[in-house]
Structure formats: structure tokens, C-alpha cells
């Protein structure tokens, strides 16, 4: 994923699999010097906008990260945003793992 014009990217929406989960990412390659924030967003079916549930540490190097979150609403998605100062050619390659859902 490259910064390009700087507009945030969004994953497809998916239904929650439990009230809590561990979200994991494995950043495998960095191009340039990006600072990327990946935010986990959620909403209920009747809501018209997403709210932020949590986010990974700012990604600036190739490494794994995990975020344990609770109180998850019905619909989930990821928001991928580059820092405004990043070059348009900065990028990352990552593997977003399936959430490890829990019922509590």
C-alpha cells in the first residue's frame, strides 16, 4: 500500500465474531520512511458513522504488532492512514491477520 495522494484507505466491513478480540498485523516491508496509523473502527447496524475502537502503534518499521480490544460493536473495519509529511511514494507491505474473537 502506497501513500499516493494521502487519502486514507478502508478495508471492507465485516461482522464482529465476539465482544472482544485480538487484532494482529505483520508488517513485512517498508518503502521509504512512512508513518502509518492503522485504526480499528466499529459501528452498530443502525449507526451511520464509524467510531474509533483502537489503533496499532504508528508503523514506521517492519515488525509485528497486536491490539487487544473489548466492547466491539456489530460491524468492524480498518482505516489505513499515512502521515501528511510522508512522501507519495512511501509505502508498506503487511499481512492483516484474522481477528482472534472472544465472547467476553
Image (cartoon, helix red, strand yellow):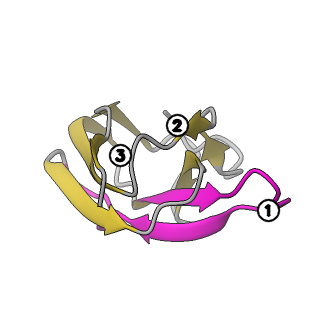
Query: Does the CB distance between marks 2 and 1 fall below 8 Å?
Result: no
Q: Please identify the quarter of the rendering in which residue 9 is found.
A: top right
**What residue sits 30% from the left and 52% below the top?**
103
Give whichever of discs 3 and 2 has the lower sequence position. Answer: 2
**What residue sits 31% from the left and 33% below the top?**
94
Q: Nearer the viewer, mark 2 or mark 1?
A: 1
Residue carrying label 1:
49
**Residue reaching furthest to the left:** 63
Q: Which residues are magenta?
A: 37-61
Residue carrying label 3:
32
**What residue sits 47% from the left and 61% below the top?**
72
* Helix, strand or loop for disc 2: loop
Position of 47 with respect to 60 (left or right) is right
- In 3D space, how far apart are the residues under numbered discs 3 and 2 (Cα atoms)? 10 Å
Give whichever of discs 2 and 1 has the lower sequence position. Answer: 2
Position of 85 with respect to 27 (left or right) is right
Q: Please identify the quarter of the rendering in which residue 17 is found.
A: top left
Q: Quadrant of the C terminus?
A: bottom left
- In 3D space, how far apart are the residues under numbered discs 1 and 3 (Cα atoms)? 33 Å
Residue 96 coordinates in the image, percent (x, y): 33, 34
Q: Can see residue 34?
A: yes
* Helix, strand or loop for disc 1: loop
Badge number at residue 2 = 2
Amino acid at each position: 500500500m502506497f501513500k499516493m495522494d494521502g487519502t486514507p484507505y478502508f478495508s471492507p466491513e465485516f461482522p464482529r465474531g465476539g465482544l472482544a478480540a485480538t487484532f494482529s498485523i505483520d508488517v513485512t516491508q517498508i518503502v521509504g520512511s512512512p508513518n502509518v496509523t492503522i485504526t480499528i473502527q466499529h459501528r452498530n447496524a443502525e449507526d451511520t458513522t464509524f467510531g474509533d475502537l483502537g489503533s496499532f502503534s504508528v508503523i514506521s518499521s517492519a515488525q509485528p504488532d497486536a491490539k487487544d480490544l473489548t466492547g466491539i460493536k456489530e460491524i468492524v473495519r480498518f482505516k489505513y492512514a499515512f502521515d501528511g509529511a510522508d512522501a507519495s511514494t512511501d509505502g508498506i507491505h503487511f499481512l492483516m491477520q484474522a481477528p482472534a474473537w472472544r465472547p467476553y
